[in-house]
Structures are given as C-alpha cells and as structure tokens.
Image (spheres, rainbow, N blue to C red):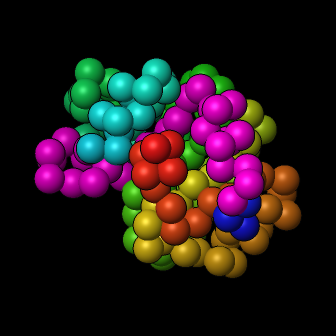
Amino acid sequence: MNHESNIHEILASTKTIALVGASNKPERDSHHVMEFLLSKGYRVIPVNPGLAGSTIHGQTVVASLADIHEPVDMVDIFRNTEDAAKTIDEALALKDVLQLKTLWCQLGVVPFEAAQRAENAGLTVVLDKCPAIEWR
C-alpha cells in the first residue's frame, strides 16, 4: 500500500474519479478537493446518498458506486475508516464493471484489512494521502 513511487503515475494515468463522501458544504475538504481535481481536468463523479440528484461543482451526485455507468479509474474515499472499509468492499464488488484500477483513502483514513483485500484483488491502494496535496 502507499506506492509512493507510483503516486505520480497514478495521478497521470487517472482520468475519471468517483469521489465518495462528496459534500456541497464549502468548508468540507471533499468540496475543495473535488474543485481542485476538476480544475486539473479530471472527470469527477460525486457520490453521496443524501445528495443524490443534486449537483456539486456542476457534477450530478449519485447515491452509490453502483449508480455509476461508466469506467472509473479511481475511487477517492472521504469517509471515516470504518465506512471506508465498507466502500472498499463495495468497490471490489464492482471492480470489473467499473474497470477500477485505484482506491485512494484520504488523510487519516487507514482501513488496513479492506485495503489488503483490494490489493489482493489486483487494485492499487493509497492510504492516508490527499491527491490534491500529492498532485502539487
């Protein structure tokens, strides 16, 4: 996990990101990171069941990863560690459908057991990092 040498490669090859835990509240980190990623040319699909159907930064929010009907290179998880583990398991179940390559857990999010399952299934996993910080 945390393939430091691969982070630049991950960010360079990623085109579409599902951002789980997206928020429409400007004070939330997920709100700023989504805006940053969009500004860098990524396609970002916000995922939040409570906001499904609304928009954040002009992008329509979906309720779950299962509601995404296009390939996704990366799932970026803005959830606590326990919820992130559930999201990782959901992503693993959809890995082939989404053509998923990378799972990224934000700062402070370290679901080790779920991350190990994801790596064992062939996904690249980054824990406890922010793509906006790493991009810079």
Residue 38 percent coordinates (x, y) = 38, 27
Give the number of callouts.
0
- Specify start and end residues of the magenta stretch as a single range: 4-31
Residue 70 located left or right of residue 133: right
Q: Residue at x 19, y 42 (%)?
A: 24
Residue 134 percent coordinates (x, y) = 51, 50
Relative to 131, say whether 36 is above or below: above
Relative to 114, say whether 24 is above or below: above
Relative to 9, say whether 107 is above or below: below
Residue 13 percent coordinates (x, y) = 68, 31
Residue 83 percent coordinates (x, y) = 46, 68
Residue 63 located left or right of residue 4: left
Residue 2 located left or right of residue 121: left
Front-most of residues 97 and 36: 36
Q: Residue at x 53, y 35 (%)?
A: 17
Q: Is residue 83 visible?
A: no
Q: Residue at x 79, y 62 (%)?
A: 119
Image quadrant in which the N terminus is located: bottom right
Q: Residue at x 50, y 43 (%)?
A: 135
Extreme residue in the front direction: 136
Magenta segment includes 13:
yes
Front-most of residues 4 and 125: 4
Front-most of residues 38 and 101: 38
Relative to 24, say whether 126 is above or below: below
Q: Is residue 14 visible?
A: yes
